[in-house]
Amino acid sequence: MPSFAQLGNDLYTGKRSFPIVAKRRRWFVIAATVIAISLLLLLVRELNPGIEFRGGSEFVVSGTSNAVEGPARSVLEQAGAQAPRVTIVGNDSVRVQTEELTSSETAAMRADLAAAYDVPVENVTSSFVGPSWGADVTRKAFQGLITFLVLVTLVMAAYFRTWTMAVAALVALLNDVIVTVGLYAGIGFEVTPASVIGFLTILGYSLYDTVVVFDKVRENTAGITDQTRVTYAEASNLAVNQTIVRSINTSIVGLLPVASILFVGAFLLGAGTLRDISLALFIGMLASTLSSIFIAAPLEVTLRQRSPAIAEHTAKVLALRAQAADAGGEPVSVTVGGRVAGVHLGSAALPHRKKKRR
């Protein structure tokens, strides 16, 4: 069985190839299904806004030897608190969130919680967060998202000199955001400023993965219409195969520390900033890796094949290939990534490039 390094070398040279672009309809159906599930989770489960977005009073009982929810819920029930939330934080702390309380109600709640958990009143801290702060954060997050999308569209179109790559990158990016937010809602974690930061951070990660693939696509398809060996789709498929090992390695390197932070935040420290941001990053990084391979490049090929020049070239290559097959065509040597690989007509390979004489 070949090693992972050997597999990567075979994929890069074209000796082996996964028909990712050829099976793009399958990936589009899977992506649409995942997006539909994510949207359904958003509608059914809905996002669970933290106190920063809904406003209210928060109490943290620290240094208790009885870090369970029961005593706090009893106090809240006696006080008639509306829609309270009780969360265990770490091994010796309990966090209690209620609607906005007055100064006297806050003092009484602190005393009752201290008595319920048998700790000094000084061990119960209180704070108030107004909903206007959360609304301001949400508004600025949306402004940042819209600005980012506009700039990405302009930069991608200018850098790759084609609108198809810009559109494909945006579709992959939106896929990552919808899937991340939907799965986050399904898991039920609170949406805090930390998770919003995580949602915005994955935009850059998603774009990075897509640019790496598209840069190789551009390299492989330069002068594609000047030869009749391979189609645009085949050259693009080779680019995806050449970058797939790099994408997997990059994802593993990025996901391992994020998974460690998620484990520590969720199981050792309890609810908190680490858990919220790491969950958003974990889902988003995984989704962006998959979308750059199975959505961005295949969609770009679909859009590019609508171009008359590419469509005509593809038909020409396939017609010549059919003629060669009828005549018993022989394998040809095609330069791939600086090496020469023997491939049959129809395999993914790079077009020959004419070298200029000095």
Image (cartoon, rainbow, N blue to C red):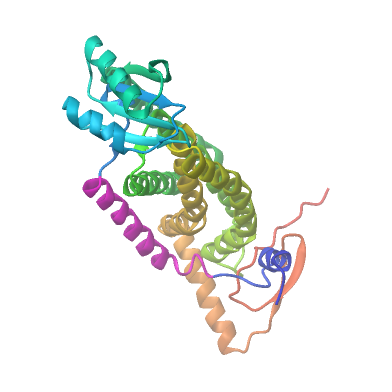
Tally the marks.
0
Bounds of the magenta segment: 19-45
Main SS class of the magenta portion in the image: helix
Q: Would residue 70 be counted in the magenta stretch?
A: no
For the point 57% across and 48% down, which residue is it? 255
> Where 216 sits versus 106, above or below?
below
Q: Would residue 30 be counted in the magenta stretch?
A: yes
Residue 9: quarter of image: bottom right
> Where 228 sits versus 67, above or below?
below
Residue 119 shows up from this direction: yes
Q: Nearer the viewer, residue 338 or 284?
A: 284
For the point 51% across and 37% down, which residue is it? 204
For the point 39% across and 43% down, which residue is it? 177
Q: Nearer the viewer, residue 62 or 49?
A: 62
Instruction: Give coordinates of residue 235: x percent, y percent.
Output: 58, 62
Instruction: Give coordinates of residue 260: x percent, y percent.
Output: 57, 45
Instruction: Give coordinates of residue 287: x percent, y percent.
Output: 46, 51
Residue furthest out toward the left: 80
Q: Is residue 327 left or right of residue 109?
A: right
> Where 278 sits versus 131, above or below?
below
Instruction: Give coordinates of residue 307: x percent, y percent.
Output: 43, 56
